[in-house]
Amino acid sequence: MRQLLILSGKGGTGKTTVASAFIDFTDAKAFADCDVDAPNLHLVMHMQEKPEISDYYGMGKAKIDRSKCMSCGICMENCRFGAISFKEGAYIVEEFRCEGCGVCAYVCPQTAIAMKPDVAGELCLYNNTRVFSTATLKMGSGTSGKLVTEVKKNMQRSCNKDAFAIIDGSPGIGCPVIASISGVDMVLVVAEPSISGISDMERIVKTAQGFGAKIAVCVNKYDTNIDKSLEIEEYCKRNDISFMGRISYDKSAAEAINNGISLAKADCRASEEIKKVYQNTMKHINNTKRREKYDSN
Amino acid sequence: MKLAMPVNENNIKSGICYSFGRAPWFMIYDTEIKKEFFIDNSAASSAGGAGIKAAQLLVDQNIDGLITPRCGQNAAEVVQGADIKIIKSQGEDIEENIKLFESGKLTLLDEIHTGYHNHGK
Amino acid sequence: MKFTRDITIMESKKIAVLSGKGGTGKTFVSVNLADAAGKSVYIDCDVEEPNGHLFFKPEITSEEKVTVKIPVVNHDLCTGCRKCTEFCRFNALAYLKDKVKVFEDICHSCGGCMLVCPQKAIYEKDLAIGKVEIGKSRQVKILSGTMDIGKASGVPIIKRLLELGSLEDLTIIDCPPGSACVTMESIKDADFCVLVAEPTLFGVHNLAMVHELVNLFKIPFGAVLNKCTDGENPAEKYCDDNDIKILGKFDYDKEMGRLNAQGEIMSRVDKAYNRKFAELSYAILEEIK
């Protein structure tokens, strides 16, 4: 199975716009939305059938049994995450801050604390003619990294072993992004021509390289700042990073996406440009020797 | 020698699992007595570090070699740290892989480039 | 043009700016709000991809490393009982060749292994995960955090940034995108949240997520509509449908976009923007009262 991951570093550069267009151009039989904090791919993919929904369990959260609690406060003293506080005469665990480490349960002299499994979100799998894996994180839960891993596994389990999968990633460079990079054949970074966009692009490129991924870059909305766009191309040249092309800021493209229409199906300048980026990317993936590497589970 | 493989079900006809850390079962095969048994992979439901926990399970089984399609960096550190060889599987057929191993046709996975080493240090 | 009227009421208030979807203009709004308010503190909690410093270009006055505690095992005292390995819910410890091995990147620094070891064979070392920088630009104090590349979570850096925040001045917190751990950490002690929304399908969808988040955290909030164009604004509709007070609107402005891309602070280069942001501060002020 081969996987192409779309990342950006900075938010709002056009990952989902690019991912959805690529999915349609290649008629991908497998795709996933790993932006579990703010999933958007389903808004453009319009799946007809009902998905399989399954619960996503996070780390488990500590629960204090009031009937056993003697209010000694030892739990609060030992909690490194500030998740236990004394409110209205009782010790309580603030779920949002609880990391599920189990220290409080261990130190409680009354064994009044237990680690309870918590449903931290929902996994959603469409599995008919195509496999589409996505998820939503329950608001207030952490562990988005683990959920990203589950979304990918869900997709991999259901699709053909020879499938070519496209994964829509999330902004940033932390845990959920790292989880999405693991095991993919190539990362395509969608960069924005702005001072923030370039700074963020450099950090995501370094992150992805650190995890052994093959990287390529394209620029979206390039005509909003030609100077910055050229800076990005120069950066790629200097650092031996393959450059896949430029996409202009196109009002009709924005309208299409706003109406949930993938740019592969729209008829505008940006769709032509994305198609070229897509063709360059596919050529690049096929030419690059498939790199055998460790990928974490 | 004792070999382990991540597998989809607890039977030899089921197939090698694509994932190591979250494989539902591991099959342990003894090449001397030519017998296999299966262990449930409790690491599969872990929040994080599933590869590490799965690797620990196998280390505790005193295996000599692990035949797998893929292996995460952390899991590899555990397995190799316990002097267990990691061997790259070919295809999904379990019995086929045993045959290939016994005829010396499988190669080591650890000859292949690994990922990030420094972890930002 | 600095506004000093009523500014005392704003003192010691923490205003978090978030959006759900990336690229809607959180940094644009936070940087300019901090500037237009005169004396203020700007905290960049997007430690994975910090951008505020690119606009302020602050004069850095101090810098400190942010570290987390990682266990170290004294192998001479270790008896191989494996209580630590079994305790760790993150699977950050493994036992092989009679030694406990610590996986530093997976460790959540809970201190549990140290507690459970019957031989007291585990102690802790500090591991750097990033840094915070304190600087200033005109009357704005800038606290910026950067996470080291390859690290999983910036939460400890955000915690440190918020600790360093002033108790006296108006504080603007520039949040990360999304609605998970790092965003929650950034908003949890805020007095007010500004939700920055863009008029797109994706923008509204993600606006709904942060809307749910601020409700969950029971923090008062209002919305700022950015990149507005003619025609229907789905973000405005969402706010109207959900009784969310719209505190300000910014039109899509190509020239502004270009200047923003160059790193210009609009409130400093354009009187009209300075006024708009001052008006926005008053609108927020009204809500906090």
Image: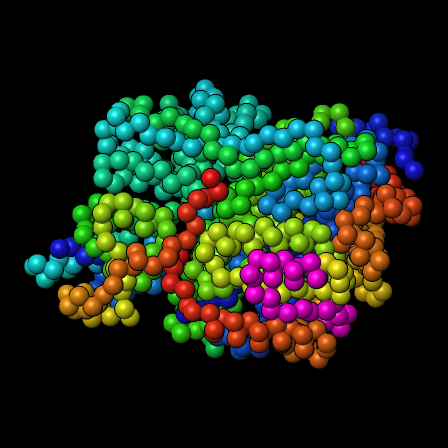
Asked whether, in this view, residue B115 is left or right of residue A132, the answer is left
Between residue C249 and residue B1, name the one nearer to us. B1
Residue at the outermost top position: A72
Magenta residues, as a range?
A229-256
Picture residue at 46% right of the left edge, 51% below the top: A146
Asked whether, in this view, residue B75 is left or right of residue A49, the answer is left
Q: Position of residue A237 (x, y in %)?
A: 60, 62
- Residue B29, by quadrant, is bottom left
Between residue B82 and residue C221, name the one nearer to us. B82
Is C115 contained in the magenta span?
Answer: no
Whether residue A138 appears in this view of the structure is no
Point out the image quarter for the N terminus of chain A. bottom left
Q: Position of residue A199 (x, y in %)?
A: 65, 50
Is A251 contained in the magenta span?
Answer: yes
Q: Position of residue A215 (x, y in %)?
A: 53, 61
Between residue C146 and residue C166, name the one nearer to us. C146
Picture residue at 79% right of the left edge, 62% below the top: C233
Picture residue at 83% right of the left edge, 55% below the top: C256
Q: Position of residue C107 (x, y in %)?
A: 42, 38
Q: How is the image coloured?
A: rainbow
* Rendered position, C113 above or below C202: above
Whether residue C53 appears in this view of the structure is yes
Picture residue at 47% right of the left edge, 74% below the top: A286
